[in-house]
Image (cartoon, rainbow, N blue to C red):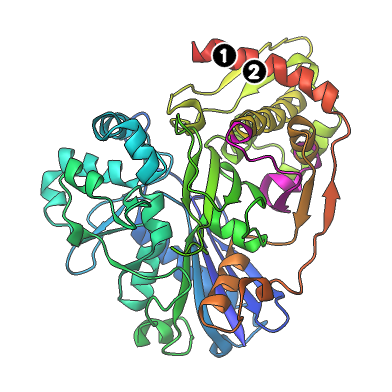
Amino acid sequence: MLLLGIDVGTSSIKVAIVDAESQKCITTVQYPDTETGITSLQKGWAEQSPEMWWENVQQAILKANATQKYNPKDIIAIGIAYQMHGLVCVDKNQQSLRDSIIWCDSRAVDIGNKAFDTIGHEKSLQHLLNSPGNFTAAKLAWVKENEPEKYALIDKVMLPGDFIAMKLTGEITTSISALSEGIFWDFEAQQLSKDVFDYFGFDGALIPQVNDVFSAHGTIHPATAEQLSLKPGIPVTYKAGDQPNNALSLNVLEPGEVAATAGTSGVIYGVSDQLVYDQQSRINSFAHVNFLEAQKRIGVLLCINGTGILNSWVKNICGNKFSYRQMDEAAAAIAPGSDGLRILPFGNGAERMLENKLVQSHIHNIDFNVHGPAHMFRAAQEGIAFAFRYGLDIMRENGMRPSVIRAGKANMFLSEVFTNSFVNATGVPVELHDCDGSVGAAVGAGIGVGYYKTAREAFSNTAPLQLVEPTQTILFDEFYSDWKGLLAKNLG
């Protein structure tokens, strides 16, 4: 029996087929081959078309089928992971009304901050675990205020993964985990937040049916099943945001366990059994995939918007003359510290850990007689590692002190330069695993359909690839101190 996992990323769609019994990935594909663009009609805006996601999901499944490594009729369940915090609005005919306002869009920062002030900081943090900030609820308020004709046509609002599940099944559902990442959920009252809905003037009918993360979210349309060579009636049994899903894929489920990812954005994600929050909402707390009212599991999330996107920008700005592997090889030939070149990687929207400030990216200390492309490659990766250290220090202030961090050997963790910079900057070993978001979504589907009795059972055959430990923490502490001073100047 097989499990299908779909990861709706910012850059592309990934699909994985996993053998349920062995828990091994049979094949994984990406579509399209080139990175998907982000529409930015104004400074700080970021949108993508939900219909484009759906088209790419279909093409990715067909591409996986074309490998002929499996029989598509053997798939028993579908799981979906997705880019968090995006807003999708559909009408009564399940047609999207506008492009999705995605996670790195900054237009709703002021709207969320005003809600934070009006509702009250302490009340918001105690009930929502976050400021409304720049999350989905504030983005919906922006549509209500600026596009009233579209807002009036909205039948349901949802997160990106809910939309893909709707296209597969025709049914619209959500979960407490999804609602919490949108800042729609009151953890104290265990219901939709009356404060948020009253303040913004939202009708609760806009919210779809609330199901558990691991449950039936509908069965695939017969016509869609035929088009994709799948068996009619396959259920969608798992939906989760990319970071909770990444944690699941790394078997990070219990208090004290910590995961990291470094894709377009960078994240450290730890699990707590307390309703924890940061007083300045620099890190964020959401319901984890295994959250239950009787067994609280809160995912504490540090997000850095400018991570892989900085690495991609540097690649492009150097004329695309180097592959990512060649960039890593060139960077490895430069001594740690990049001969004084420092980069702040904050050019992809308002950064939550910097209190939603638009700092932008900055390159410091360029010497025309010393620095070349290889220095840029290394300084970018070190700058991202220092941003992780900055955020991890905030998490430490809030009681999360990991002794090891688990990460998939993917994206920037494929780079030895970045991985070593990360462990030396943070002072925490990294345990690398062979997994990605689409594989995690497939495993989640297996849990949701009941093939695995517990989440632990779903990972019984997995083991880490390697452990990378710090070796130069004193040296990197010096580099980090210099980098942090430059950030302080840019923060004003």
Amino acid type of the residue that numbered disc 2 sits on in the rendered structure: Lys
Residue at which label 1 appears: 488
Q: Is residue 283 above or below residue 442?
A: above
Q: Quadrant of residue 252?
A: bottom right
Q: Is residue 454 left or right of residue 360?
A: right
The front one of 409 and 70 is 409
Asked whether, in this view, residue 170 is left or right of residue 361, the answer is left
Q: Which residue sits at x=50%, y=26%? A: 354
Residue depicted at x 23% and y 31%? 118
* Residue found at x 64% / y 60%: 436
What range of the chain is rendered magenta? 395-418
Left or right for 128, reference 316:
left
Where's the N terminus, which quadrant?
bottom right
* Dot label at residue 484: 2
Q: CA distance from mark 2 to mark 1?
A: 6 Å
Type of amino acid under label 1: Ala
Contact between labelled residues 1 and 2, with CB atoms less than 8 Å apart = yes
Residue 132 visible to an observer of this rendering: no
Give coordinates of residue 342: x percent, y percent: 68, 19
Residue 172 position in % (x across, y down): 30, 70
Q: Locate residue 492, reporting x and y percent.
A: 49, 10
Residue drawn at point x = 81 percent, y = 37 percent: 420
Is residue 184 among the parts visible in the rendering? yes
In-image side of 196 versus 459 (left or right):
left
Helix, strand or loop at label 2? It is helix
